[in-house]
Image (spheres, rainbow, N blue to C red):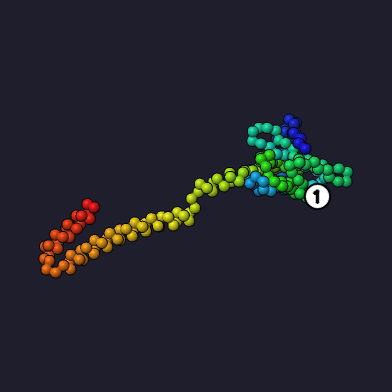
């Protein structure tokens, strides 16, 4: 069941959307899980903040896109003489059989057709404030694409110290070789101080130019 909202209906939506109330007692909110993976379950919950059963008010749920197209009615519930009659789009399911202030439409397997904004509406004499919500549906690859391009902070934490440690070990090894060479020169028997200094100068020169 797909019923399109005509121009008069759209004007009514705009009129109700622009309504404001100081007390905030009649705010109508909408809730979804945000963005879900294609094929996973999802939901659209409307909190009308009115006891629909007692008030006997008809209520609607619309889905709309950002391309400027008219909203599509996905659920219409009207009060009959002694019961409620609800027409729901085949892509959704009405969760609760008892009508109260909150109504949830179930989505067994989220598809692209479910993506978009949602708008809950009720006809009432009270001044109402409406809040939209949106549902995003992405493939599993799209959901994981951002994770593939992010380097885990733990890897950076270990990679940087590892590189610094390697440089430190190389420098320490070079220093140890130079120190060992200098010690061996000083230990040579019969070598004068001038000869030792000459060897040390040569060693430093070779080290600097190597």
Left or right, 33 with respect to 2, comes to left
SS for tag 1? loop
Where residue 119 sits: x, y (%)? 70, 41
> Could you classify mark 1 by the number of other residues whose Cα lies within 10 Å: few (under 14), some (14-19), or many (20 or more)?
few
Residue at image position (76%, 35%) is: 3
Number of numbered callouts drawn: 1
Left or right, 71 with respect to 200, comes to right
Left or right, 29 with respect to 207, comes to right
Residue 68 against residue 145 in the figure, above or below? above
Toward which corner of the image does residue 85 lie, by quadrant?
Answer: top right
Of residue 12 and residue 89, the one placed in the foreground of this image is 89
Where residue 198 sits: x, y (%)? 14, 59
Residue at image position (52%, 47%) is: 148
Q: Which residue is mark 1?
A: 97
Residue 75 visible in the current orientation: no
Residue 21 against residue 200 in the figure, above or below? above
Toward which corner of the image does residue 161 lie, by quadrant?
Answer: bottom left
Where residue 138 sits: x, y (%)? 62, 43
Residue at image position (12%, 66%) is: 191
Of residue 92 and residue 194, the one placed in the foreground of this image is 194
Residue at the top extreme, as displayed = 7
Residue at image position (30%, 61%) is: 172
């Amino acid at each position: 069941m797909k019923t399109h909202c005509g121009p008069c209906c759209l004007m009514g939506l705009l009129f109700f959307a622009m309504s404001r109330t100081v007390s905030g007692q009649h705010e109508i909110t909408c809730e979804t899980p945000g963005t879900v993976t294609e094929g996973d379950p999802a939901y659209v919950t409307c909190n009308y903040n009115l006891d629909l059963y007692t008030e006997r008010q008809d209520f609607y749920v619309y889905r709309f896109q950002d391309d400027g197209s008219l909203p599509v009615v996905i659920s219409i519930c009207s009060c009959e003489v002694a019961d409620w009659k609800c027409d729901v789009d085949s892509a959704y399911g009405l969760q609760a059989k008892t009508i109260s202030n909150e109504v949830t439409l179930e989505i067994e397997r989220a598809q692209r057709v479910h993506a978009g904004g949602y708008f809950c509406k009720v006809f009432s004499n009270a001044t109402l404030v409406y809040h939209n919500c949106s549902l995003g549906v992405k493939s599993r690859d799209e959901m994981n694409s951002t994770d593939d391009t992010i380097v885990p902070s733990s890897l950076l934490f270990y990679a940087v110290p590892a590189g610094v440690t390697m440089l430190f070990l190389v420098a320490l090894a070079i220093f140890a070789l130079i120190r060992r060479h200098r010690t061996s020169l000083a230990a040579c028997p019969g070598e004068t101080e001038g000869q030792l200094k000459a060897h040390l100068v040569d060693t430093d020169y070779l080290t600097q130019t190597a």
